[in-house]
Amino acid sequence: MTKLSVNINKIATLRNSRGGDMPNVVQFAKDAQRFGAEGITIHPRPDERHIRYQDARDLKAEVYTEYNIEGNPVESFMKLVLEIKPTQVTLVPDAVDAITSNAGWDTIKHKDFLIDVIKEFKQNDIRTSIFVDSVLEQIEGAKATGTDRIELYTEAFAHQYSLGNKDAIKPYAESAKLAGELGLGLNAGHDLSLDNIKYFKENIPGLLEVSIGHALIAESLYLGAENVIQMYLHKLK
Ligand SMILES: CC(=O)[C@@H](O)[C@H](O)COP(=O)(O)O
Ligand SMILES: NCC(=O)COP(=O)(O)O
């Protein structure tokens, strides 16, 4: 069974574009859970251009499924996560100016840093996951940090799959196998979508959780547009 955690960063991005409170991110999280989401993911960035630190606090009371907070463990992020104590923290090595996440950790180079950070979260009963590329040495390096889980960075798979290259799944399947042998829990995310999720799931053993945001929100807009346009037309009759 693979859990679906809905990433609601895009809801905050849409809200921020007008400066008001529409759509309301807490209400969206409540509704997403009512619709069946098994987790809510947010990724607060230091410049708060998507989800804000205060959103992260406001969501705490309403997320009764798995609450997953992703981000680079800079001081302000560490403080926020330790204050909120979500179900899971996913560590992502984002540059401050990255448009979106674009690489996994170098778990070998940053081993000592990751060991310290992971220890602190685990001492506070927060499950840890680290964002990694599908490279076997990096999965072994992740094991050495003491993390509970890894999250496979799936952007390359999603891109290649969209071009028809189904073999792009191979490094992910090998990484998943190794993670299972090492006793690491397995999550995945980035650019997963209605197009590629079934194939990904079918080929990745032991997949515990996927976090999906960008495509899920875009698909929701598109699949909902006909209904909403019809509702406007009806009210304008
Ligand atoms: C960690 C990851 O894979 C990203 O997809 C991220 O969570 C998305 O964040 P943005 O919505 O800020 O691009
Ligand atoms: N961890 C990945 C995530 O939360 C969502 O990524 P995306 O679907 O917005 O690319």
Image (cartoon, rainbow, N blue to C red):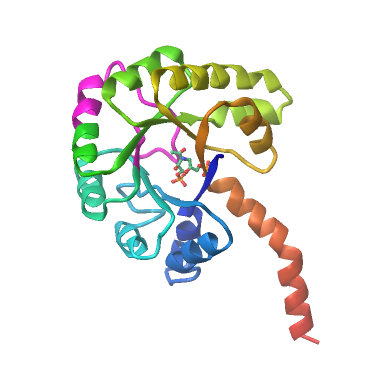
Q: What residue is shown at x 49% (from left), y 71% (from top)? A: 22
* Viewer can see residue 189: no
Q: Quadrant of residue 70?
A: top left
Q: In the orientation shown, which residue stands out farthest toward the right?
A: 237
Magenta residue check for 115: yes
Segment colored magenta = 89-116
Q: Position of residue 113 (x, y in %)?
A: 21, 26
In-image side of 209 versus 63 (left or right) = right
- Give the main secondary structure, helix, strand or loop, of the magenta stretch: loop
* Viewer can see residue 113: yes
Q: Quadrant of the C terminus?
A: bottom right
Q: Position of residue 210 (x, y in %)?
A: 52, 40
Q: In the orientation shown, which residue stands out farthest toward the bottom?
A: 237
- Indicate whether 188 appears above or below 37: above
Q: How many marks?
A: 0
Q: Quadrant of the N terminus?
A: top right
Q: Quadrant of residue 222?
A: bottom right
Q: What residue is shown at x 48% (from left), y 54% (from top)? A: 8
- Indicate whether 142 appears above or below 195: above
Q: Position of residue 121 (x, y in %)?
A: 23, 40
Q: What residue is shown at x 40% (from left), y 26% (from top)? A: 184
Taking depth in this image into account, of 174 and 11 the one nearest to the observer is 174
Magenta residue check for 213: no
In-image side of 107 versus 76 (left or right) = right
Q: Position of residue 33 (x, y in %)?
A: 51, 60
Taking depth in this image into account, of 99 and 9 the one nearest to the observer is 9
